[in-house]
Each structure stands twice: as structure tokens, then as C-alpha cells.
Amino acid sequence: MALKGGGDSWRQGIDLLAPWIALVAVKNFSLETAGRDAQGQQLWRTRTVPIADCLCPLPRFIAALKTAGYSGSYSPHSEYEGSHSFRELSTDECLQQTAVDLQYLRTLL
């Protein structure tokens, strides 16, 4: 929601969609420059990063979900393999990062 709406507009999304939210996927990302297009416009790409890092304000997001009455499941997404990841992790490293992410997520719940 942070990527699509920026700022605090994600709160409006929660308010509008709260009755229908059944599962919340949890991941975080950073933005980095990716050159320029043919007209000179700056291009950007996302990188998946540990959930405690970067753009998504997860503590405020989860607090807003609680305020809206959400009591469903959270699904951490460990997308740390491939070129979209902050770095290429082995399976063991991915499991370790997922454990760190889950520990952080639990502090917010």
C-alpha cells in the first residue's frame, strides 16, 4: 500500500476495505534508480528487503489494522531469492532472515 499510495493514503484503503480483509501479506521494499527511459524520465525498481527496513511503516500499518478490528492472519513473504531481493540469499540464509522477520513481526502484533 505504501508503494501504491504513498504517504498515509493506505489508511484510507484499510478504512474502506476493513470488512473484507481476510489475510495480510507482509513484506517490505526499497526503491533504487534504474536508469532513464527514452524521454529522460528517471526509472525506479523495487528491492525486497527485511520487513523492519525501508518504506512500509509496518508498526503504523498494523496498529491501523487493529483499530479497524482486524484479527486475522499475517503472512510474511520471504522473497529473498532472485534479482528483486536486496541480496541473493541461500536457502539457509533465507530461513534465517525469515526467522528475524517473524521475530520483528511478533513485536508488532
Image (spheres, rainbow, N blue to C red):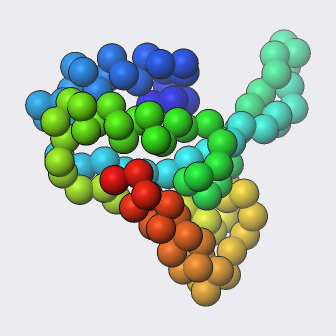
Give the camera-side residue of 59 and 74: 59
Q: Is residue 27 visible?
A: yes
The answer to which quarter of the image holds residue 80 is: bottom right
Residue 48 in view here: no
| Residue at the extreme front of the image, as rendered | 107
Q: Quadrant of residue 67?
A: top left
Residue closest to the eye, 99 or 49: 99
Instruction: Determine the residue positioned at 77% across, 27% down.
Output: 43
Where does the N terminus fall, quadrant-wise? Answer: top left
Residue that lies at the very extreme toward the top in this rendered image: 39
In the foreground, 37 or 67: 67
Rendered residue at 48%/42% (across/down): 58
Residue 98 placement (x, y as % from top left)? 52, 71
Which residue is depicted at the point 33% across and 31% down? 64
Q: Quadrant of residue 73?
A: bottom left
For this orientation, the residue located farthest to the bottom is: 92
Q: Is residue 93 left or right of residue 51?
A: right
- Spot occupied by residue 105 in the image (x, y as percentages of width and height): 44, 58
